[in-house]
Image (cartoon, rainbow, N blue to C red):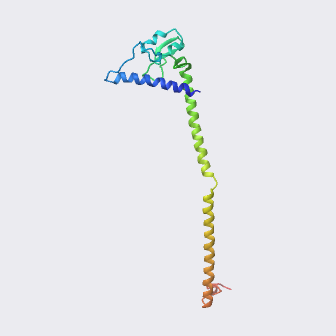
């Protein structure tokens, strides 16, 4: 639920900031909103001061207005800055978009949500990495190890068979000696 006011804040702030920047930098004249527009969200920027000493809801019908709870003033939102300066209104009493969320609570909520999301992603990455490292070998790994062991055993059998054949041939031709040739050098 806390992400909903943040999204509303971003959606409402973005068009106001783009509109003010395009007026300042664009050489092409852009059509401006007249005060006789019937939609309350699209009123001209000068209408904010008219809602001073009224209710927060009346002030915030215009997206370019900022409500200050301390002095019940409806002010033009400073679109050149992301947050209103303290000289205009303290963050704890400034309202924009909706009356029930102040900027201070919004900043804290977004920071906690962002930190929680980052922490969750980091924990998930660590768990996945640990699981991959410590997982047991799967069936294909087990099969490859079994085949490797079988090949090694067959190779040892062949080696032993070849050695016995060579020993038989050596015996047949008298080349096979039972004793160690270096035994004569030992002192008996």
Locate residue 17 relative to residue 177 in the image: left or right: left
Q: Position of residue 143 (x, y in %)?
A: 62, 62
Residue at the limit of the structure toward the right, as seen here: 188
Locate residue 69 relative to residue 134 in the image: left or right: left
| 48 vs 93, nearest the viewer | 48
Q: How many marks?
A: 0
In which quadrant is the C terminus drawn? bottom right
The answer to whether 154 is drawn above or below residue 1 in the figure is: below
| 44 vs 187, nearest the viewer | 44
Residue at the limit of the structure toward the bottom, as seen here: 173
In which quadrant is the N terminus drawn? top right
Q: Residue at x 39, y 17 (%)?
A: 33
Locate residue 40 relative to residue 175 in the image: left or right: left
| 65 vs 116, nearest the viewer | 65
Asked if residue 87 can be seen in this view, the reply is no
The answer to whether 112 is drawn above or below residue 124 in the figure is: above
Asked if residue 139 can be seen in this view, the reply is yes
| 144 vs 41, nearest the viewer | 41
Residue at the limit of the structure toward the left, as seen here: 27
Q: Residue at x 44, y 24 (%)?
A: 15
Q: Position of residue 105 (x, y in %)?
A: 57, 23
Q: Position of residue 115 (x, y in %)?
A: 57, 33
Q: Residue at x 41, y 25 (%)?
A: 18
Q: Position of residue 100 (x, y in %)?
A: 57, 19
Q: Residue at x 58, y 27 (%)?
A: 2
């Amino acid at each position: 639920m806390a992400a909903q006011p943040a999204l509303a804040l971003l959606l409402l702030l973005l068009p106001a900031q783009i509109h003010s920047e395009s007026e300042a930098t664009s050489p092409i004249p852009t059509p401006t909103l007249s005060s006789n527009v019937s939609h309350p969200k699209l009123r001209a920027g000068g209408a904010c001061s008219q809602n001073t000493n009224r209710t927060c809801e009346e002030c915030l019908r215009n997206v370019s207005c900022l409500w200050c709870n301390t002095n019940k003033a409806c002010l033009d939102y400073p679109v050149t800055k992301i947050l209103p300066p303290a000289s205009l209104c303290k963050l704890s009493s400034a309202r924009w978009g909706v009356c029930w969320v102040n900027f201070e609570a919004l900043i804290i909520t977004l920071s906690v949500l962002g930190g929680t999301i980052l922490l969750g992603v980091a924990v998930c990455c660590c768990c996945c990495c640990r699981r991959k490292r410590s997982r047991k070998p799967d069936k294909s790994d087990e099969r490859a190890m079994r085949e490797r062991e079988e090949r090694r055993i067959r190779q040892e059998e062949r080696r032993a068979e070849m050695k016995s054949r060579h020993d038989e041939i050596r015996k047949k031709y008298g080349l096979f000696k039972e004793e160690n040739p270096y035994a004569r050098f030992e002192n008996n």
